[in-house]
């Protein structure tokens, strides 16, 4: 039986179920003695009566305890509680290799690096007389520090013979003592089994080498080495066939890698690599030699030309790539011709360039690479990197939800924002490092002294932080009337920086100004009064004015512009709501930008549980931060928040769900958003900006009369999330610095705020259950957002619902299901068991994917639980990225 949160196994307190497999269930737990978080693996209760299984479980403990290696999961403890056997291991954060491969093949550099680490771990195990016997992508975890080899549950002791001095191989002889698996028994996963395993013969280190070859092949190609329509055909393929060479699937891969994998997958163990150490050394050599390992230069050049020509749609880009490659290698930007080139989004993807999850194109300081965000279909945003002299872009694994990338000054790292955090990643891929919290990112910049400036919230100053991470420190002087500082950008001296400042209660076009500040001074000055981000490059200041990208000479000594602005490109893509133009410039005279208009935000759609669009409600609109569709209790209308691009303000509107017509519910200055209906449908609560840096929670009758403030704070953000079914309480979220608390206010009492979920974690988007006994909400207490349920109105027990991340919970009207979105943008339906006096989560089923709008998805559930009113994002503007070399030459002709 699955253990619930709070259960104890010896000194270990169970926190949550992580996963389950044939050999056990794995839980996140807390070691109450050493105050650390661990992973606890227990033998399933239905298997506990099997002596053989118990023996294998004990063997796993003994096996792992002998292995101490950077790339092998560490064992801390073993124990037994009643009839429950368990292991205590280090808790690993990351994703399994199988999960990563579901997104496609790894870049060559990662394939070689991870492969070398796996080989090193196998070599350590083999030298201690241990064969893994079940090596597969699901037993490899990708963490920030590299890979970790998991689950030696099928490992088998082997007697190690003495190795002659100078020998290059490690001969092994299988021991017969205490071998629980006798000859003739098959253990492992068919897809990765060596022929001798399929025949039920004894396994040695070379058996792991075969499995490793299959894993390496899958890492490089994204395809399994062996496949079949049935178990019999799969076994036949492993016994008789060889997979197609890697180079036929990935033409840019080095033939030396083909040779390594082919030797791993030899049918006869004598023909394979005889030990993992030699195998690892070979992979390391390929990595150090680069992609040309084992390739003659003419052959490699021919292959690259062939691949490029198959992708390039126009001869013009080929000329640009050649010119850029030559000039960049020579480091003479002034010698570049003036060339304009268009770069399309990756196949099947669209650029994500505007809205709150903006990912504008950013060119590296040396002009060699582009970084941008794009997504495929309804999936999450990913960070992509593309060399300007190559034809293909590649996504960076682990960057789901990425937005607003920026480069390190040496071009080796990319900073970005995701999952409410500031992060960085090597340009070639690898682990993602979290540097600081960032609630609602508004841009970052990085100087050559290792200082990062970033804005972690929609409101507030710019902060500074070391590039290695640390405690953020305020970097700009935040005036009494300032409402936001955003889009910091270092000047070439690495000391001064531009940033955009806006004022209290102002929309995008009211009193904005680009300022220049300094790291070592509190002084600042206004450079230009305009609502835009700004870049200093090639002696010019670039910014957007009235939809056009303009350049104005910039005097770095006086920190002031000179002369008149000159139009570089008209109709540059501009995120009007957030005052962010889509452009970037390198130190070497290369400019990148997009033209066109940002996508009209989104539309309301009725979608069924299978993801079929049943009906579109009304016309597209600029729904504010997703639009908050909240269905009225009688099911006839929905309350939404819509932004007016002319003023930059949003208001609450009511949409007739039958006709699609809209009527304005609020008016005036300042934003009004996040509407919630009272249970009787007679009142609507919403958040109102009163011209200060804070927001009030306001309650108004649906006929427009009787407005009253029920929660106020002049300094913080506040917004309603829902009523209790009896109408006595209103839930709302309240910001404290960069974190959020979930609060409730009694509407018929003293209206003193009472905490519902108020811890150092981020807790928001609370929803009261239809029976009024529980509140579902999202919290990042575990380091990621998950869905939790707690008692209401009095605090008490708490349950975790989602197991792999979750956003924005919504109850079905009968309280029998709890819906939420998973990290892959898929709506999940969790079965709710019990009654008003108990709560239990049953099966969790996936429904459909829907692209995220802003920070959340924004949806509501119809009374029948079979339809969902979803604020569906429309495709982004398809305009390509325009790349211009030696852009100042054209500019000088206009002056």
Image (tube, rainbow, N blue to C red):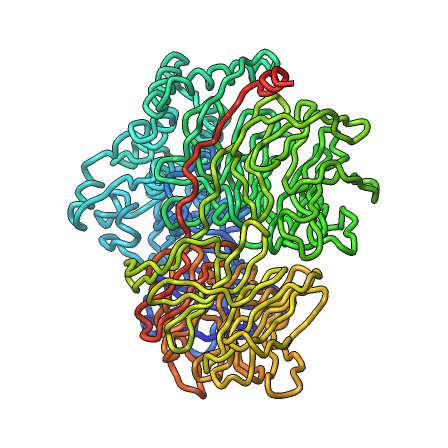
Q: Quadrant of residue 615?
A: bottom left
| Along the viewing direction, whichever of 730 and 101 lies nearer the viewer | 730
The answer to whether residue 836 is above or below residue 722 is below
Residue under the image location 29 percent in, 28 percent down:
248
| x and y percentages locating residue 412 in the rendered image | 59, 32
Residue under the image location 75 percent in, 26 percent down:
562
Left or right: residue 706 compared with residue 247 = right
Quarter placement of the C terminus: top right
Left or right: residue 294 compared with residue 668 = left
| Along the viewing direction, whichever of 468 and 473 lies nearer the viewer | 473
The answer to whether residue 245 is above or below residue 318 is below
Q: Quadrant of residue 171?
A: top left
Quarter placement of the N terminus: bottom left
Residue under the image location 35 percent in, 24 percent down:
313
| x and y percentages locating residue 856 in the rendered image | 49, 59
Mark yes or no: residue 131 visible: no
| Along the viewing direction, whichever of 778 and 490 lies nearer the viewer | 490
Left or right: residue 693 compared with residue 731 = right
The answer to whether residue 521 is above or below residue 609 is above
| x and y percentages locating residue 33 in the rendered image | 63, 70
């Amino acid at each position: 039986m699955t253990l619930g949160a709070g259960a104890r196994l010896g000194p270990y307190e169970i926190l949550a179920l992580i996963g389950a497999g044939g050999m056990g269930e794995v839980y996140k737990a807390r070691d109450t003695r050493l105050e650390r978080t661990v992973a606890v693996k227990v033998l399933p209760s239905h298997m506990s009566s099997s002596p053989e299984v118990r023996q294998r479980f004990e063997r796993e403990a003994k096996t792992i305890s002998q292995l101490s290696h950077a790339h092998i999961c560490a064992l801390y403890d073993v124990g037994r509680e009643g009839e429950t056997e368990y292991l205590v291991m280090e808790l690993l954060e990351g994703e399994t290799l199988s999960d990563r491969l579901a997104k496609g093949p790894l870049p060559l550099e990662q394939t070689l690096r991870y492969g070398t680490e796996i080989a090193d771990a196998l070599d350590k195990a083999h030298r201690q007389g241990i064969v893994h016997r079940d090596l597969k992508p699901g037993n490899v975890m990708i963490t920030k520090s590299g890979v970790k080899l998991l689950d030696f549950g099928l490992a088998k002791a082997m007697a190690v013979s003495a190795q002659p001095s100078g020998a290059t191989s490690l001969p092994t002889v299988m021991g017969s003592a205490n071998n629980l698996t006798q000859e003739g028994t098959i253990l492992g996963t068919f897809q990765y089994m060596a022929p001798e395993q399929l025949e039920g013969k004894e396994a040695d280190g070379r058996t792991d080498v075969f499995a490793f070859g299959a894993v390496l092949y899958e890492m490089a190609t994204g395809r399994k080495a062996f496949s079949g329509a049935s178990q019999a055909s799969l076994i036949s393929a492993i016994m008789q066939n060889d997979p197609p060479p890697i180079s036929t699937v990935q033409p840019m891969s080095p033939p030396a890698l083909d040779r390594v994998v082919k030797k791993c997958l030899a049918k006869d163990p004598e023909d394979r690599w005889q030990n993992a150490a030699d195998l690892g050394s070979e992979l390391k050599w390929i990595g150090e030699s680069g992609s040309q390992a084992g390739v003659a230069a003419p052959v490699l050049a021919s292959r690259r030309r062939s691949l490029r020509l198959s992708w390039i749609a126009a001869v013009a880009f080929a000329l640009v790539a050649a010119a850029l490659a030559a000039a960049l290698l020579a480091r003479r930007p002034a010698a570049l011709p003036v060339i304009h080139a268009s770069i399309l989004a990756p196949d099947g993807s669209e650029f994500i360039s505007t809205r709150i999850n903006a990912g504008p194109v950013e060119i590296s300081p040396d002009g060699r690479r582009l970084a941008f965000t794009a997504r495929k279909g309804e999936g999450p945003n990913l960070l992509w990197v593309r060399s300007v002299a190559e034809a293909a872009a590649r996504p960076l694994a682990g960057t789901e939800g990425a937005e607003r990338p920026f480069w390190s000054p040496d071009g080796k790292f990319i900073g970005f924002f995701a999952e409410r955090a500031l992060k960085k990643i090597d340009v070639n891929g690898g682990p993602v490092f979290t540097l600081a919290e960032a609630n609602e990112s508004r841009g970052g910049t990085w100087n050559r002294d290792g200082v990062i400036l970033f804005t972690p919230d929609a409101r507030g100053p710019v902060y500074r932080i070391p590039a290695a991470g640390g405690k953020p420190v305020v970097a700009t002087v935040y005036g009494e009337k300032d409402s936001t500082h955003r889009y910091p950008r270092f000047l070439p001296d690495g000391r001064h920086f531009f940033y955009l400042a806006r004022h209290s209660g102002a929309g995008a076009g009211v009193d904005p100004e680009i300022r220049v500040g300094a790291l070592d001074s509190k002084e600042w000055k206004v450079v230009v009064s305009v609502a835009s981000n700004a870049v200093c490059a090639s002696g010019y200041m670039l910014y957007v004015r009235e939809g056009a990208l303009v350049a104005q000479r910039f005097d770095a000594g006086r920190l002031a512009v000179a002369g008149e602005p000159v139009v570089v490109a008209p109709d540059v893509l501009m995120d009007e709501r957030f005052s962010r133009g889509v452009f970037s410039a390198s130190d070497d005279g290369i400019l990148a930008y997009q033209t066109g208009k940002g996508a009209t935000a989104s539309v309301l759609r009725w979608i069924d549980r299978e993801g079929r669009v049943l009906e579109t409600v009304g016309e597209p609109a600029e729904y504010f931060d997703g639009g908050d569709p909240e269905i009225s209790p009688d099911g006839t209308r929905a309350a939404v928040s819509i932004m007016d691009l002319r003023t930059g303000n949003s208001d609450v509107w009511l949409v007739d769900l039958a006709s699609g017509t809209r009527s304005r519910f609020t008016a005036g200055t300042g934003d009004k958003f996040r509407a919630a209906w009272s249970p009787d449908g007679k009142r609507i609560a919403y958040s109102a900006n009163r011209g200060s840096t804070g927001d009030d929670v306001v309650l108004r009758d649906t006929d427009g009369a009787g407005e009253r403030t029920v929660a106020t704070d002049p300094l913080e953000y506040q917004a309603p999330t829902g009523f209790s079914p009896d109408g006595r309480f209103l839930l709302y979220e309240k910001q404290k610095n960069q974190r959020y608390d979930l609060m409730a206010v009694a509407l018929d009492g003293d209206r003193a705020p009472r905490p519902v979920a108020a811890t150092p974690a981020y807790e928001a988007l609370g929803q009261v259950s239809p029976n009024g006994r529980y509140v579902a909400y999202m919290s990042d207490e575990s380091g990621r957002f998950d869905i939790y349920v707690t008692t209401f109105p009095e605090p008490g027990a708490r349950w975790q619902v989602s197991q792999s991340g979750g956003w924005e919970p919504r109850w079905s009207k009968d309280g029998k299901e709890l819906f939420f979105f998973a990290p892959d943008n898929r709506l999940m339906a969790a079965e709710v068991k019990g009654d008003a006096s108990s709560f239990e989560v049953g099966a969790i089923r996936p429904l459909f994917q829907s692209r995220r709008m802003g920070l959340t998805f924004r949806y509501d559930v119809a009374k029948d639980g079979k339809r969902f009113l979803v604020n569906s994002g429309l495709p982004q503007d398809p305009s390509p990225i325009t790349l211009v070399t030696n852009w100042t030459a054209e500019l000088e002709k206009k002056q």
